[in-house]
Amino acid sequence: MVYPMDDRHSDRLERMRRELETLRTLLSAAVPGSGIPTVEEIHELEGLRSAVRVLERSLQRFEAERNASKTASITVDADGRVVSWNRRFLEMFLPDCPIPLPDGRSLLERLDALCAEPGAVSRWADRPGTELPRALFLLRDGKRIVAEATRVDSEPPATVYEFFDVTGIEDPAHNLATLAEAARGAPFRLERTQGRWRLASLGPAIRAIAGLDPRQLVGQPSRRWTARVHTEDLAVLRRAFREALRTGRRADLEFRLWHEDGSLRRLAIRAVPIRDREGRVAALDGLVLDVTERKEDEENLRRASTQLRVQSEALDQRTRQLQSLNDLARGLQSAKSQAEAIRSLVRNAPKLMPDSIGAVYLNDPSGTTHAAAFWPSSSKERSPKSLAVRECWAACLGRPAEPDQPSPEMCRGCPNDVAKGRLCFPLSDGSPGIGFIHVRPAGPGFTPHQWALIRAACEQFALALNNIRLRDALREEAVRDPLTGLFNRRHLDGTVRAEFEHAVRHGEPTSVLMLDLDHFKQYNDRYGHEAGDRLLQALGRFLSQAVRADDVPCRYGGEEFTVVLRDAPLEVALERAEAIRKGIERLHLTMGRQVQAPVTASIGVASFPQHGKHFSGVLRSADMALLRAKREGRNRVAAANRT
């Protein structure tokens, strides 16, 4: 009978090797390439290094025990590949075989060649079933080898073959003792005497294993030597023995036992029932092994594996969050408007800030902050729709309200249960302006790393929104006349010209008004340049209110103005021009207590398609009509001649 050190020993070695390789790969990937690592990265690296050290020590101990064993062992996977072997296997069968070893089938054929009976090992190994019976092989050199195989349900499946040299061992008791010595265990025998089971023999190694004196236990009932068994394991131990004695099947179990030095040891028992001539179980031969160190290694391996899994999941989550942060940055970079930027934030917020409730609040000129967006959509009912700027720390002071700054008197806009543990991030740098972002956890709270990501997302959004507003302001300055607030000549020559040509291509009637203030030079000379500027400002305000939203009023230069009327044929344009002329006549301005004289305007009107096929032609026709209106006496509307 062979008592291998552990049926799953090789499987554990392979799993440990794979776990160690995975840890080393993860560790190399986690080392920052450049820059100063954060505190979280330092803790993460230390955890990975600790896991690698634990696995390396466990792997070295397992391999040392396997190589020190007198049992030759080899592991072959389901595809016939030799997965692992120990030194004793090479010494016993293949002292001159080169490394790496041949595949499993070729290896069995080599063992067949060593046997006195050709093909004995292959026939034994090819038997179906999950367990192979023990076998005794006689080699050509006279050696006697006991073989045992165990199918390992691993990934991929494998078979562990173990061989023990029993040459010169004839006495079964001697055989058992020799095998026990090889496995560093204590052999024992239970025999039925006068209808009761008593301990017939117990190896001396039990002193070191369990702190028990075999002389005080031999011949005594089993309850004497089970007295130190852990109370939680005693019932399991007794049930396993009863089952082995009743069925005659092999018993394999592990249990805890208190050593005489006070330590708790993990022991393993392997026992085989012995039958008498009548087929009844008459004895139980077994072996007690101390597996405390192995269990500690397995526990270290389990902890390292758990730590690896947790850290791997944390790294995966961090990778996903950084990817979401990059997606947010790309979305904000491509946003052309404030609305697009807000949509990009709301779209990426659930991935970047999982289990969060948030809202974007924007200020209006009246001093009220309105909610522009929420996430998730279900939180809309639980967040204030609007609040006064003075009711929010971030909106009032222009700096973030951190989670550890409850300040309830400055956060009256937040519900009482969320004022602490929220982040309100202003959308301007150092002064109240655009608005703020409100973020709070939907669950127990965020980790420091999650808060750092949230702050980074808020900073990116605030920067993008400020850039969009700055871009819009610069665009407005580039196309607006600073005195009148109307569009300038540059906008007329660029955007308006392109839109006019688009209308021409689609056959849409479009008209142009050229307007000039009558006798503006005399007005300036009489009332001064300040009064002239105020007149131009008043005319700008009047034109902005007098035209439709789709129409484009522009200051063409000096006291000349242009109005582009979209989707307006000539008849409609003449009516609009006459209404504008009469409105200018009714303008009354004062300078201090002095009432200024009323002003008039002359207007020329031209339309597509009557007066030109392109913007430049229609504009020129309107200008010529304006000159004709001035020649005919001013303060009138003149239509261009048909071309």
Image (cartoon, rainbow, N blue to C red):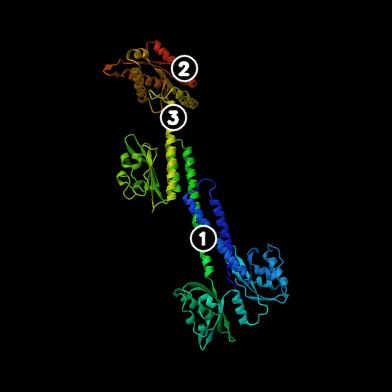
Single out the mark in the foreground, 2 or 3.
3
Task: Measuring from the top left, give residue 123's x and y in whole percent.
Answer: 68, 72
Q: Residues within 10 Å of mark 1 (few under 14, many from 20)?
A: many
Single out the mark in the foreground, 2 or 1.
1
**Which numbered circle lies on residue 304?**
1
> Which badge, 3 or 1, is on the more N-terminal residue?
1
Seen from the viewer's position, the closer of residues 273 and 297 is: 297
Alpha carbons under labels 2 and 3: distance apart: 30 Å
Task: Measuring from the top left, give residue 100's x and y in whole percent.
Answer: 68, 62
Q: Identity of the amino acid at label 1? A: Ala
Image label count: 3
Q: Which residue is mark 2?
A: 620
Taking 312 as reference, is 601 left or right? left
> Which badge, 2 or 1, is on the more N-terminal residue?
1
Q: Which residue is mark 3?
A: 474
Task: Measuring from the top left, give residue 416's x and y in whole percent.
Answer: 31, 49
Quarter occupied by residue 370:
top left
